[in-house]
Amino acid sequence: MGLILDLARQFLRDYNIDGLPASGVYEPEKSAGRALFEAIDNQPGFGVAAGDSIWQTPTMPGANGGPGDIIAVNGQTPEGYIAQLWEPLRQAHPGYITRALLGKDQSGTHDMWRYEFTPPNPQKTILLTCNAHGFERLSQIGVFLFLREVAQNWKSHAGLAHLRWNVRIVVVPIVNPWGLAQSPPTRWNSRLVDLNRNYDYRWTEYVVTNPSETGSKGSAPFSEVEAQYLRDMLDQYPEAVAWFDMHDVNGPGPSGAETITHILYAPNPLNSGAAINIGREVFESIKGPDDNLLCFGAAPQPSAGNYATARGLIGATPEATTDGSSSSRWTSLATTRAVKFWGNLIIRASYQDRPSARVCAPFVMQARWAAGSDPSILTSATTYADIPGLNLMCRVPGAGLMIFDGVATVRVTGAGTGNPGRVFLTPKIGIEQNPVAVASAVRNDYWEVYDDVQSGRVSVIPFKAVIPVAGNNGPISGGPQLRAGLWWRTSTETPGATIELLRYQATLEFRPSDHVAKFQYYRSTGFMSESEGAMKQIFPYPNPFAETP
Ligand SMILES: [Zn+2]
């Protein structure tokens, strides 16, 4: 055991978190974040594992070159970022941070560097890449500021200490130095290739629809040397648990409720459950006035995040938002927001195993009703309408299956003696912008059931519907996203029939999975217009690019 390690452990033992007595062990669950998570646990549709601890990010400096700023982004060269940010940090921590020269970029003019933050005995490895799109400079600055916190302020939080002493962090701060060096900086590299479309994940199937905007995907997977360096990085650290490829978008600012502040792209329908679950948990823990809207994007492109996921890592493309779109958009607000989002993602990922066994908590919601003192619920309509009051709603915390089933007890009158009234019920379950459900066929599920009921008689009719889900897409601050309810109607073949609802019991169950691709969802083809005798695979989709499976 080295002296430095012993000293470090002594320091850990002696250090208090949030005023709690030092226990001798760094336990994340002892930080102040615990109470917040317990509060979130009480909300329907969301649960997190005990022991998770958010990092309350201190205010970060801006990067507009003003007083107190970390750097001046405008006009900054790739070499300037290395000299002003990364090298001083490395030189301040020579036993912790090293760097390796990867070689020249595709243009042959810029050196490409990889920095490694290596604790004495790393138990995990996390890969980070930034600035693959040359103009997205917040991606590099945000990661730098977070890693500076890990190196210099790890004593302030258990998650940072965990990274500092247990986790190797490998970062390529500037994946696209040529694009960054242009005036103005560009998205693509020197051969007008979008480096984030140059990986081998579904490269052949991917069609570049707007090359003037996004660049080409290259002549072949890994045709560009910049993408080769990143491929080789994963080959060198195949045990890495996560690879986050940071990006950013210009935002109009955080004031409007509609403004997206955080985006998490993950492939579809590969095993993106772990990344989605972590992203959802992080966002739930940090959301506030400046962090007000998370969107999940499911984009089956040949990107770094998708390549990493296909290789079994927790892979994702987390995007943060700059402060408006002006030439001074790298404000403290923007950097703090990015560091808070990405830092907590990295902390959370560092507690995961690979392949991740992480799942959200399962939950059940139930609705029960019986006729009594309430007014009768009746319908004579021959077109579908909601059964009033039967409407279960929740947010979807992560990947899994949503199952909606139950029974309804009905009585038919007015159909005439000996003349059955036909009762139709359709359970309906749907999620807005379900990122798993590429095809509209499983975005919602409607499964009509019916029974023929003699006038005056009672019938008990069961119903069931199921859809695969991932974390909600779209705004989550606007309220519940998944809805489950029941439609009912009678038939034009039995005019005059009235259905009276006597009782119902309906259950909505979330059955979580860490791995979206583990879902296998089949339907018989022996109904409606399809031929009989076969099962149709509904999920996973044979071709995620097709709008219909
Ligand atoms: Zn980008």
Image: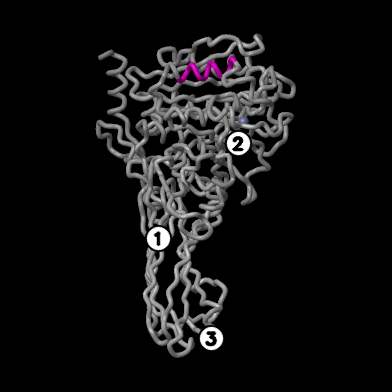
Q: Nearer the viewer, residue 454 or 433?
A: 454
Query: Of label 3 and label 2, which has the lower sequence position?
Result: 2
Q: State the extent of the magenta-drawn residues as a range.
A: 225-234
Instruction: Provide the residue designation for mark 1.
Output: 508
Q: Is mark 3 within 8 Å of ligand 1?
A: no
Position above or below: 477 against 368: above
**Crowd tier of the residue under label 2, counting other residues whose Cα lies within 10 Å: few below 14, some 14–19, many 20 or above:** many
Position above or below: 20 against 446: above
Amino acid type at image mark 1: Leu
Q: Which mark is residue 334?
A: 2
Query: Of label 3 and label 1, which has the lower sequence position?
Result: 3
On the rendering, which quadrant does ligand 1 occupy?
A: top right
What is the x, y in percent for residue 30?
32, 40
Q: Nearer the viewer, residue 541 or 71?
A: 541
What is the x, y in percent for residue 131?
60, 25
Nearest-to-viewer mark from 3 and 1 = 3
Position above or below: 215 against 393: above
Magenta-drawn stretch contains 458: no
**Mark 3 in CB contact with mark 2 (< 8 angstroms):** no
- The residue that appears at 39% across and 34% down in the rendered structure is 157
> Marks 3/2: CA distance?
64 Å
Q: Secondary structure at mark 2?
A: helix
**Mark 3 in CB contact with mark 1 (< 8 angstroms):** no
